[in-house]
Image (cartoon, helix red, strand yellow):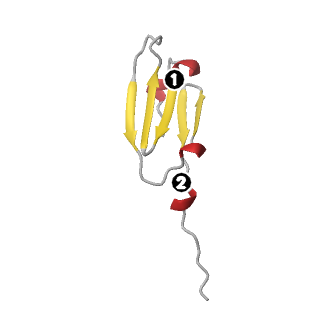
């Protein structure tokens, strides 16, 4: 997910990104002159501990990884 409009004029320190269960929330701090809050429903099986956010050249990029339990695993036939 990339959100250039959100990050265009907002410093990194004033952005907050949070994953809780299958919900992603992106918002600005109250001190920010441009208030924004966006909430997205994520598919099942996202690992919040492996989520990454990067702000570069005004673009907020989020990387969300599947949980190990959601990744297919080959089962040996005996």
Q: Which residue is mark 2?
A: 66
Q: Quadrant of residue 72?
A: bottom right
Q: Position of residue 32 (x, y in %)?
A: 47, 13
Do tag 2 and tag 1 residues touch (Cβ < 8 Å)? no
Eyeballing the image, is 70 above or below 2? below
Numbered disc 2: secondary structure: loop
Query: Camera-side residue: 2 or 75?
Result: 75
User: Which residue shows up at 55% across the image and 50% down it?
Assistant: 65
Look at the image and tell me in which quarter the C terminus lies: bottom right
Density class for disc 1 (Cα within 10 Å; few <14, some 14-19, many ≥20) is: some
Q: Position of residue 67 (x, y in %)?
A: 54, 54
Q: In whole angstroms, how far apart are the C-alphas of marks 2 and 1?
A: 24 Å
Name the disc covering residue 67, or none: none
Density class for disc 2 (Cα within 10 Å; few <14, some 14-19, many ≥20) is: some
Q: Is 12 left or right of 30, judged from the image as shown?
A: right
Going from N to C along the chain, the mark reached first, 2 or 1, is 1
Eyeballing the image, is 31 above or below 23? above
Query: Camera-side residue: 7 or 57?
Result: 7
User: Which residue shows up at 60% across the image and 45% down it?
Assistant: 50
Q: Quadrant of residue 55?
A: top right
Number of on-image labels: 2
Eyeballing the image, is 30 above or below 7? above
Numbered disc 1: secondary structure: strand
User: Which residue shows up at 57% across the image and 58% down it?
Assistant: 68
| Residue lying furthest bottom | 78
Q: Which residue is mark 1?
A: 15
Q: Position of residue 73 (x, y in %)?
A: 57, 70
Q: Quadrant of residue 25?
A: top left
Q: Position of residue 4 (x, y in %)?
A: 48, 29
């Amino acid at each position: 997910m990339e959100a250039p409009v959100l990050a265009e004029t907002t410093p990194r320190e004033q952005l907050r990104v949070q994953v809780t269960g299958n919900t992603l929330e992106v918002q600005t701090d109250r001190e920010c002159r441009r208030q924004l809050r966006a909430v997205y429903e994520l598919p099942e099986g996202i690992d919040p501990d492996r989520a990454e956010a990067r702000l570069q050249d005004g673009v907020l990029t989020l990387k969300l990884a599947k949980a190990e339990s959601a990744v297919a695993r080959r089962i040996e036939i005996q």
